[in-house]
Image (cartoon, helix red, strand yellow):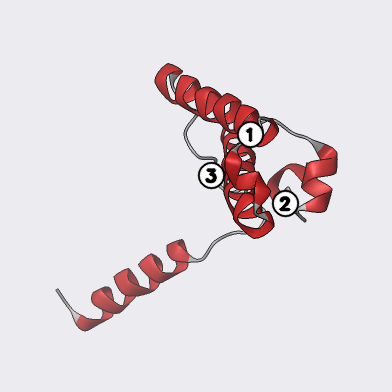
Amino acid sequence: MSEASRSENVTRVEVERIPNPDVEAPQPPALGRTGRALWTTIALASAIYIFVPEPTDVFPVLGWLDEGMAFMLLTTALVKLEVNIPILNMLLNRKQKSRSRK
């Protein structure tokens, strides 16, 4: 292989790696039936946990920590399930870049 053909191959590979802003970013694979059931169960369990009082709620900081974690699990599950809640997105400053370009 000559030096000129090697440099052409390297240049071509480097050009292919540059992301094209006009092309939409690849979407993650859709959840299967099992994944959807898992994230639905996590969302329901964390939503119930947030609203059911437990003994740690007597101590403010400790109660905030466990319910904060449950809230983060709930929001993660809703994102995985592709549930769009505009107020929640606004509060958490989530931006839908790929959907806003359409």
Q: Earlier in the sequence, mark 1 or mark 2?
A: 1
Q: Give the residue furthest to the top.
A: 33
Q: Which mark is residue 78?
A: 1
Q: Residue 10, relative to residue 76: is it above or below?
A: below
Mark 3: few/some/many CA within 10 Å (<14, 14-19, 20+)? few
SS for dot 1: helix
**Residue 88 horizontal/vertical position (percent):** 79, 43
Q: Earlier in the sequence, mark 2 or mark 3?
A: 3
Residue 10 in sight? yes
Q: Earlier in the sequence, mark 3 or mark 1?
A: 3
Between 68 and 8, which is closer to the camera in this rendering? 68
Q: Which mark is residue 97?
A: 2
Q: CA distance from mark 1 to mark 2?
A: 18 Å
SS for dot 2: helix
Q: Residue 11, relative to residue 35: is it above or below?
A: below
The structure residue drawn at horizontal position 30% and vertical position 78%, both measured from the top left corner, is 7
The image quadrant of residue 54 is top right
Disc 3 target residue: 26
Residue 101 in sight? no
